[in-house]
Amino acid sequence: MENKEPLFSAKIKKTFLEPLNINNPITIQILGICSALAVTVKFKPALVMAISVVVVTGFSNLIIALLRNTIPMRIRIIVQLTVIATLVIIVDQILKAFVYDVSKQLSVFVGLIITNCIVMGRLEAFAMANKPWPSFVDGIANGLGYGIILIIVAFFREILGNGTILNEKIIPDFLYNAGYLNNGLVILPPMALIFIGIIIWVQRGVLIKKK
Amino acid sequence: MEEILNIFLKAAFIENMALAFFLGMCSFLAVSNTVKTSMGLGIAVTFVLIFTTPLNFLINYYFLKPGALTWISDSLKDIDLSYLSFLIFIATIATAVQIVEMVVEKSFPSLYNSLGIFLPLIAVNCAILGASLFMQEREYSSLSQVIPFSLGSGIGWLLAIVSLAAIREKITYSNIPEPLKGPGIAFITTGLLAIAFMSFMGIQL
């Protein structure tokens, strides 16, 4: 393959950095919220979920970019879904084999990576029109952009809701003795939405100020 | 009869697809600007749901479950194809959406135009695949449980998106901080709506 572009050109760097902040899939593009929220009660499932999504977005982008010239336009959605579903099955089997307890906690949400709009959205918007290497970078970066938000939300929900991180106690005992209580409301699913709303608020506020 | 009603109410309110599990959020937040289009989308989603979930149930029951193939021959009873379920379920859904799209385009052109891109996108609406996966995980044992479950999930999703759309129509006239406009406030509204829906949680059926 005659690829004149260096492996880490400025363009690739931009492709990689944009989804992490100014074009974040969750807060700016509003994609992939579906499975994002229910898994953020605890830090560990969120971490596992984030890694799974990075793997799926990266490799589905790579595969579709390799196939992009042979896929007929009319049936591309079914082709894309087949590729995604196969990758998700692989991820699901690996999770079941190595981290069974987390895989049980995530339950249907691993399967729901298939319908995660980020994966489909990146395939449509990027991988169908770009070379494999930039597509792979784009996929990984979007997965990471998704993962970051997931981890931020899970961090706050676990520390406020349970006073722990990865099941390690973080909030010291004297605070509890002084009358500090874990906030039960934060564990409830709706709070995830409100947290993301606040993240969007902060992020857009910073971005608007920069302009 | 009572069991059917219970499953329906549970799926529609207590375990609402949109507000308790956050499924179908992408189109939920994107289309909920006006009541009219969100109603159309809600109906389309409900329709696809009541069509695909029972179909996937039958496929799961007769082909994919561990030991499901015994009706062909006894020697196949050790085969467990359930790892294929994601692939098969999404294929059923994509096909069903394609059919619905063609039917709507032919018979209801006005609805087709108002839904636009979101009709094909129902294929990747997590609420639909989610319903199929929940159906598999909760091990419903007959169609008389699956049909009310899928109908309830659809109606619940419809109610949720229409109520959010109604609130958002009003919010456009409010004075919201600049960075919070649009998606930010939609998230927070959905969160509050979900907290309200949680009041159904204590109900024992």
Image: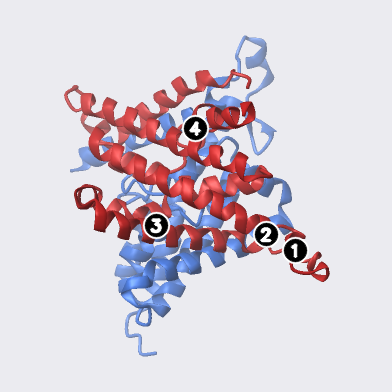
Residue A159: name its quadrant: top right
Q: Which chain is blue?
A: A
Distance from disc 4 to disc 3, alpha carbons, whole Å, reads 22 Å
**Where in the figure is residue A142, as x and y percent of width and height?**
41, 57
Residue position marked by numbered label 4 in the rendering: B16
Q: Is the residue under label 2 in contact with that under label 3 (CB below 8 Å)? A: no
Residue B156 seen in render: yes
Q: Is the residue under label 1 in contact with that under label 2 (CB below 8 Å)? A: yes
As displayed, is residue A62 above or below residue B177?
below
Amino acid beneath label 4: Asn
Residue position marked by numbered label 3 in the rendering: B97
Residue B66: name its quadrant: bottom right
Mark earlier in primary sequence (1, 4): 4
Residue position marked by numbered label 2 in the rendering: B62
The foreground one among B131 and B47 is B47
Residue extending furthest toward the front = B1
Residue position marked by numbered label 1 in the rendering: B71
